[in-house]
Every structure is written in C-alpha cells, then in structure tokens.
Image (cartoon, helix red, strand yellow):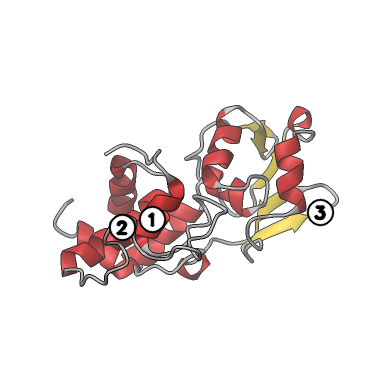
Amino acid sequence: MSRFTGPRLKAMRALGLDLPGLSRKSISARPHSPGQHGAQMRRKSDFGLRLMEKQKLRVNYGLTEKQLRRLVREARGSRGATGEKLAELLERRLDNVVFRAGFAPTIPAARQLVNHGHFCVNGRRVDIPSYRVNIGDVIALSERSAKLDCVKGTLAEPALIRPEWLHWDEPQRVASISHLPAASDVPFPIELQLVVEYYAQRL
C-alpha cells in the first residue's frame, strides 16, 4: 500500500476526525462519512476499529504501509509499551518536527520542503523526511529558504500550538528538541493499543 495521495478532506471524513498533519481544513461542516449513505450510523467490527486507528496514523504522518510496519516492529523490540514507543518514533520524524515547529502548514508540505533541502539539523543540511531527531538537535531553515513566502506565512500563523517537547527560539526562528515526545503529544485522538493489536498477527 502506497503513501496516501487522494482527497484529504474525504479521507478525514472517512476516519471521522480532523488530522492536522494532513490538512488545515476541518470536517465540521460535513462530519459524516463520504458517500450516499455516509450519514447512517454503522457499527464497526473489532477488525474495523483496529484498522481505522492504524489508518489515522498512516494517513496523518504520510507513511506507506511498509514504513509503518517497520516502525511498529522497531517499537515492539524496544523497552516500554509498544504504543508509546510508536508514537515517539512518529513524532520524531523530521518532516513532522518541521510541521510541529510551524515551518509548514501540513506534513506533506513539510516533507516537500525537507526533500528540497531547505532545512539543516545541527548546521548540516538534511533532505530525508524520515530522519529521526534526538534530544538537543537544532532544526533551522537554510539561509536561502528563510524568505520563502509559504514559510513566512505559516510561521505567522502555525497550524498547531508548538508542543512542549520542542523549544522555539523566536528571534533566531529555530527549533530544538528539549526532550522526547510522548503518546499524549499526538495531536489527535488515537487508541494506540488498537494499532498494536492490529499488527499483532501481521508481523
């Protein structure tokens, strides 16, 4: 299964919630599922509930199925709760950090900026969206990129309040990682245990 590139608002309506990493739009005007019978309440099976929780992560963070499986496998092999570790690994992706710091309006936009080499980590250019940041890392725009209109507009009105694990230096306009994110830092409702259960027999 490839990375999601379809209609973003339709995907959020199908999942029943706003995904800030995917779009700045809201489903509040049409909160029911898309389609002729979308407004009708339908009870989901246990499998359907687990699949929906998994899809929330995959669509919001813009991952392929293969990428998410790899992260779940890594989370299972680490100490602590698998769901907590999975949330941490997702939040530490560079494209997500660029988004959460307010440099980009969405994660797809952040991914494009990173791919084009607009960001430096600890003074070195990094163009890999899946690059994993660590405590103490400093993320900054390259000099030529600070004048981009899309970046200036988003910095003036960030999509989300910057999380507590990100330290923001307003005069320098750089972000640094003060500590590792937790599951509570995921910016939308998610049942991580259901995601773990979904992959329990698929890895």
Looking at the picture, tell me which residue is in the foreground, 123 or 189: 189
Q: How crowded is mark 3: few (under 14 residues within 10 Å), some or many (20 or more)?
A: few
Q: Would you identify the image quadrant in which residue 120 lies?
A: top right
Residue 69 visible here: yes
Q: Which mark is first along the chain, 2 or 3? A: 2
**Which residue extends farthest left?**
201
Total numbered labels placed on residues in the image: 3
At mark 2, the secondary structure is helix
Percent from the top left, x then y, of residue 117? 62, 28
- Locate residue 161 relative to residue 77 in the image: left or right: right
Looking at the picture, tell me which residue is in the foreground, 57 or 97: 57
Looking at the picture, tell me which residue is in the foreground, 76 or 145: 145
For badge 2, the amino acid type reads Lys
The tag on residue 203 is none
Read off the residue under disc 3: 170
Percent from the top left, x then y, of residue 163? 62, 63
Residue 79 visible here: no
The tag on residue 57 is 1
Looking at the picture, tell me which residue is in the foreground, 132 or 184: 184
- Locate residue 15 relative to residue 9 in the image: left or right: left
Percent from the top left, x then y, of residue 105? 62, 47
User: In which quadrant is the N terminus drawn?
Assistant: top left
Q: Would you identify the image quadrant in which residue 80 lies?
A: bottom left
For badge 3, the amino acid type reads Glu
Q: Which of marks 3 and 2 is in front?
A: 2
At mark 3, the secondary structure is loop
Read off the residue under disc 2: 54
- Mark 2 and 1 residues: CB-CB less than 8 Å, in contact? yes
Disc 2 to disc 1, how far (Cα)? 6 Å
